[in-house]
Image (tube, helix red, strand yellow):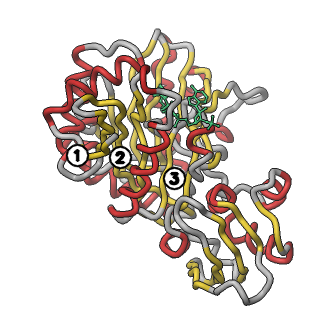
């Protein structure tokens, strides 16, 4: 089996593989997909596994920005992992995923994430449960009553606003010290902001993208950097309450809207889990943000048969972190599997990691690690 970059000539075969894996695709969706993937083929972001000339598997690396404690870094979003039905269960999926990991590192990404349809294949390669896309169902009427108390300038948004939208995301996630949310690149935003079924509004510190779905309003994205803008954008959606009973929205675990609602007892939430992997320990630690109030150090040994492990001294101060190779003969270390480190980076507490066998070794570092990596990781976007 040969693994190589896909070319435009392979796209019909990839589409066939996708239909065999995920079911029929409307002609218009297939066209949208082609428009989105053709530019990435030349960037080494779509791999195929070939049995002779026959395409047996494919996987795509999407180029995202992901914020960790408010600091953005490039992230390889793995999507469209598909093995032909006749080739499944023979290690092909694992082989193409290994190639995806190598490619992500070659492209300069220190971290990667994916939404799993099944977890064992990704777990065995070091990806671990990190966060979720949480969708909450809210009564439209209660949103209508969130009247903006001041003047927020909100205008309609189109494809030409992609760069401004990205700038808003950078400002809002830095200020909120967000962990987990992603942004598409400008080209992809441009395509999305051109979708006729969506309604889009932007303010100086927030934006809203929504559509009608089965008589309800479905929010794709609502990001707001201030209480005023949150009220303004949520009330726009709520203004549909004469027609829509519910608004379904992806929200952060601590999304302000959940505290703004006049009435809240039970939350109706669905969670789509995502998994995360640290690919390059030193770069991932350096690119992450940390609580400015935390100054600490810890020694960790990472056991990673896929990427190669090692022992590092982690130092966190002033909101930044470094991982310096420490050799194996130094101070007693906490020991983390690749999965354990990936989960820790995403804010999973050391107590959980120890109770699940993802962490062992010296316990004296645990409180420092918990303080440094504390996060409630989330994503608003499914990919
Ligand atoms: C999921 C998929 C990519 C796995 O590819 P594959 O070549 O069959 O996987 P491998 O042979 O390398 O198996 C890797 C591990 O995953 C497990 N696995 C494979 N398919 C699975 C499934 N449907 N459910 C649960 N586990 C599965 C295997 O048992 C193996 O674990 P093990 O070594 O502990 O037995 C492939 O079955 C597929 O294309 N499925 C349909 C599309 C899909 O779900 N894609 C994933 C999108 S995130």
- Residue contact between numbered discs 1 and 3, judged by CB atoms under 8 Å: no
Q: Nearer the viewer, residue 293 or 155?
A: 293
Q: CA distance from mark 1 to mark 3?
A: 35 Å
Compared with residue 288, is residue 195 higher up or lower down, i.e. above or below? above
Which residue is painted at 55% across and 55% down in the image? 277
**What is the CA distance from the residue labelled 2 to the residue labelled 1?**
9 Å
Q: Residue drawn at (46%, 56%), measured in percent from left and top? A: 66
- Asked if labels 1 and 2 touch by Cβ distance under 8 angstroms, the answer is yes
Ligand 1 picture quarter: top right
**Residue at image coords 59%, 53%:** 126
- Locate the N terminus and report the quarter of the image it occupies: top left
Q: Earlier in the sequence, mark 2 or mark 3?
A: 2
Label 1 sits on residue: 40
Mark 2 or mark 1, earlier in chain: 1
Which residue position holds label 3?
226
Q: CA distance from mark 2 to mark 3?
A: 30 Å
Contact? badges 2 and 3 (CB < 8 Å):
no
């Amino acid at each position: 089996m040969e693994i190589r970059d896909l070319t435009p000539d392979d796209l019909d075969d990839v589409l066939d593989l996708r239909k065999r894996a995920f079911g029929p695709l409307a002609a218009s969706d297939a066209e949208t997909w082609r428009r989105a993937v053709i530019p990435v083929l030349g960037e080494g972001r779509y791999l195929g596994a070939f049995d002779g000339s026959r395409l047996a598997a494919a996987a795509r690396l999407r180029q995202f920005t992901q914020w960790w404690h408010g600091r953005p870094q490039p992230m390889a979003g793995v999507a469209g992992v598909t093995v032909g039905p006749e080739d499944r269960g023979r290690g092909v999926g694992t082989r193409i995923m290994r190639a995806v990991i190598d490619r992500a590192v070659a492209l300069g990404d220190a971290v990667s994430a994916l939404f799993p349809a099944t977890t064992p294949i990704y777990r065995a390669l070091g990806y671990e449960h990190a966060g979720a896309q949480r969708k909450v169902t809210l009564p439209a009427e209660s949103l209508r009553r969130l009247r903006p108390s001041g003047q927020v300038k909100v205008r309609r948004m189109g494809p030409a606003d992609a760069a401004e939208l990205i700038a808003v995301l950078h400002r809002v996630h830095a200020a909120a010290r967000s962990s987990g949310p992603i942004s598409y690149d400008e080209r992809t935003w441009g395509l999305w902001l051109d979708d006729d079924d969506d309604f889009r509004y932007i303010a100086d510190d927030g934006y809203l993208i929504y559509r009608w779905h089965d008589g309800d309003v479905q929010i794709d994205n609502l990001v707001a950097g201030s209480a005023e803008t949150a009220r303004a954008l949520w009330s726009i959606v709520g203004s549909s309450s004469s027609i829509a009973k519910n608004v379904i929205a992806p929200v952060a675990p601590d999304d302000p809207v959940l505290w703004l609602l006049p009435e809240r007892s039970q939350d109706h939430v669905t969670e789509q889990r995502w998994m995360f992997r640290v690919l390059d320990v030193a770069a991932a630690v350096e690119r992450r943000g940390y609580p400015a109030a935390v100054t600490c150090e810890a020694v960790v040994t990472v056991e990673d048969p896929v990427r190669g492990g090692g022992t590092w001294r982690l130092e966190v101060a002033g909101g930044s972190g470094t991982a310096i190779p420490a050799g194996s003969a130094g101070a007693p270390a906490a020991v983390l599997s690749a999965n354990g480190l990936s989960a820790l980076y995403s804010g999973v507490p050391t107590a959980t990691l120890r109770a699940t066998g993802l962490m062992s070794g010296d316990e004296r570092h645990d409180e420092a690690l918990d303080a440094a990596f504390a996060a409630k990781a989330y994503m608003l976007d499914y990919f």
